Image (spheres, rainbow, N blue to C red):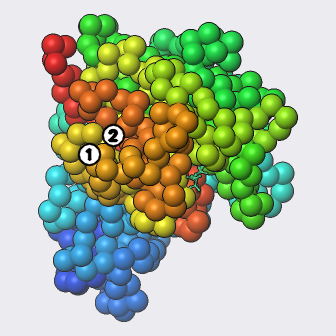
Amino acid sequence: MQLDWQIAPLSNWQADAVIFFFFEEPSEPLPGAKRWMTEKAGWMAESMALNDFKGKHQQVAVYYSPAGQAIARVVCVGLGPSDKFDMDKLRSVAAAALRKCRELHVNRPGLPLSAFEGLSLETPSALQEVLIGGLSGLYTYQGLKTRDIEPQGSPETLLILSEEEPDEVLRAVPFSASAIASGVYLARDLVSAPSNQVTPSSLAKVADRLAQTYNFRLHVIDSDEAGALGMGAFIAVSQGSREPAYMIVLEHTPPGTEEDRPLVFVGKGITFDTGGISLKPSAKMEAMKQDMAGAAAVLGVFEVLGKTRIKKRVVGILPCTENMPGGEAYKPGDVIRSLSGLTIEVISTDAEGRMVLSDALSFAQRYEPALIVDIATLTGACIIALGHETAAVLGNDDSLVERIREIGMQVGEKLWPLPLWDSYFESIKSDVADFKNVGDRSAGTIVGGIFLKQFVPREIPWAHLDIAGTAWADKDLGAIPKGATGFGVRILFELAIRLPQPDRTL
Ligand code: BES
Ligand code: ZN
Ligand code: ZN
């Protein structure tokens, strides 16, 4: 769906429908809708008096105007009670309105800026969230179907209707909203696609496409190079698979930022996780195609960085491999020397994410990062602790953790902190190596974090996002359709925008 401005007096608006928001309580229409009804759509008062539409959250009613009007439909969408209203509701309401337009094949719906009056939100951010929520809610993945395909294609364009010339800030909103949505779409496409299509090689091709399009530097480290560098943990996980493994490194260094310390984003890219020799049960194993959702989120962020040309130096490091059993697979009991020099006793080959991430985190040090954020579908325990709508955030810097949590709340990607005290290290002490790759069953998500912490120097602010529960939605979440969510793209992008480039001397 394209986004376009239409700047004209209310009486000259031209669209296939116009969208307005309504609270459930009070039942009084918001000022924009009221003005529209007074000046252009007096007939609506009678229809609304029937009280079929109550403004309940996500309730949608379409009113049809009498013949001869420039705008034939009014899509009314409910925000729910005003005291329970927030950005999350606004995003899902936008999705509901646009899905209704799609269902009705409304090609060019209009969204008046005046629809935001009375919501007590800043118009630019409310508009941005409505646009992103709407685009996000319209996402479908049907590329592999050959029949029973639901017709798509509409809405073709969402018109943002304004009576006056928008200021510069407002003017830029549709562009950045669609850039962000395209990053989310890319991440979802990659996670939705099956593992016979999304392999480490195909992820390297995506990175190459991004590098060519946006002028990023790309370095794809193959197994030979990884071996020569000493990435023993990454190689260990990859050696059971016939698919070539790659550590993909993307670099966005806009002119003038060459001397800056970069933000480094590390994304787990296990394109399929069988568990390896510590084989997973077969029930629901197909879900393990999502185990590259961290890498997909980082690729998504690079799409957004490229489109928006944010002036921040950002490096993405994606350790990509399958985790397979086989004659050459790594085994429980093996001791692996990681790139850092630290030795790891493998207890479970299914704890492969932390293995590949450990080498990626060590490799990140070469970039003298200002900070590191890794994002990974790391532990089933995260789903037990926080469910499917909240991810875990852990790290060595409380203010970074808090910042990420706050951003997550604002953009609709919820996170909650877990502690990362060194006492948790006890459970991964090893008799034969520096430590083990798993502890007992307790505090699984924290122990995953403690393991990763061993590979990050204390002085570098680092956060770890465990997205095992949030990378995939088992049911429709309003602004997020069932399936791959693209979780993390928005948080990482916001972090890149908001964090001042720290002083090089830090
Ligand atoms: N990829 C899984 C974690 C996962 C589970 C992601 C469910 C998405 C949904 C990870 O590699 C894994 O297998 N973790 C183990 C760790 C354990 C061996 C310490 C787990 O969670 O059981
Ligand atoms: Zn695993
Ligand atoms: Zn995994």
Q: Indicate the position of residue 193 as horizontal and vertical percent values.
A: 69, 44
Q: Is mark 1 within 8 Å of ligand 1?
A: no
- Quarter occupied by residue 495: top left
Residue 22 appears left or right of 75: left
Quarter of the rendering occupied by the C terminus: top left
> Which amino acid does the dot numbered 2 rest on?
Ala
Measure the C-alpha gap from mark 2 to mark 1.
6 Å
Which residue was labeled with disc 1? 401
> Which amino acid does the dot numbered 1 rest on?
Val
CB within 8 Å, label 2 to label 1: yes
Give the class, few, some or many, for how many residues have Cα within 10 Å of label 1's Cα (few <14, many ≥20).
many
Q: Indicate the position of residue 208 as horizontal and vertical percent values.
A: 60, 18
At 32% across and 55% down in the image, what residue appears? 418
Q: Is residue 188 above or below residue 459?
A: below
Q: Indicate the position of residue 411 as horizontal and vertical percent values.
A: 32, 51
Q: Indicate the position of residue 205 as horizontal and vertical percent values.
A: 66, 22
Residue 463 is labelled as: 2
Secondary structure under the numbered disc 1 in the rendered image = helix
Among the two numbered marks 2 and 1 on one chain, the one whose residue lies closer to the N terminus = 1
Give the class, few, some or many, for how many residues have Cα within 10 Å of label 2's Cα (few <14, many ≥20).
many
At 56% across and 68% down in the image, what residue appears? 475
